Image: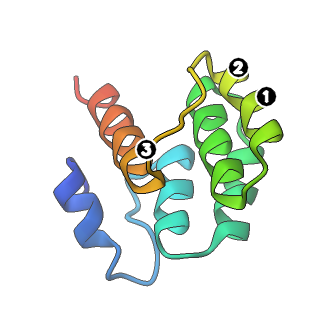
Amino acid sequence: MVVNVTDFKASLSGAEPASNLDAPLAALWWAAKGNWDQAHGIAQDEETSEAAWVHAYLHRVEGDIGNAGYWYRKAGKPAATGALDAEWEEIVQALLASRRV
């Protein structure tokens, strides 16, 4: 079970994302595994602000900054300009923290 970033990173050794990951986190899992298409397919099928944030990140990875900007606005987030790895970790941390009750 994934409950923190360390667990999330450790789960990357598996063949599939952990069963307790929702769509935005699963998309980030696939992105970390280098499967942009799988990650994008998951993110674009969700209509939450969290999925929009992941979708923005994925378009930034792709190099499509204009499209990324659209998705950052949909997510209500400022457009990221820092390192992609740092943004990935920031999103993972934020999404995992929002699931703790």
Q: How is the image coloured?
A: rainbow
| Residue at 50%, 55% in the rendered image | 28
Q: Quadrant of residue 14?
A: bottom left
Mark 1 or mark 3: whose residue is earlier in sequence: 1
The residue labelled by disc 2 is 73
Q: Is residue 91 above or below residue 61?
A: above
Which amino acid lies under the numbered mark 1 shown in the image of this protein?
Tyr
Residue 87 screen position, x and y as percent: 43, 44
Disc 3 designates what residue? 87
Asked if 49 appears above or below 22 in the picture, the reply is above
How many labels sit on residues?
3
17 lies above or below 85: below
Q: CA distance from mark 1 to mark 2?
A: 5 Å
Looking at the image, do the residues carrying marks 1 and 2 touch, with CB atoms under 8 Å apart?
yes
Position of the C terminus, as image quadrant, is top left
Q: Estimate the x, y position of residue 21 in percent, counting from the top left.
A: 42, 52
Calculate the distance from the C-alpha at mark 2 to the C-alpha at mark 3: 16 Å
Look at the numbered discs 1 and 3 and tell me whether their residues touch, using CB distance below 8 Å.
no
Name the amino acid type tagged 3.
Glu
Q: Nearer the viewer, residue 8 or 62?
A: 62
Q: Secondary structure at mark 3?
A: helix
Gap in Å between the C-alphas at discs 1 and 3? 17 Å
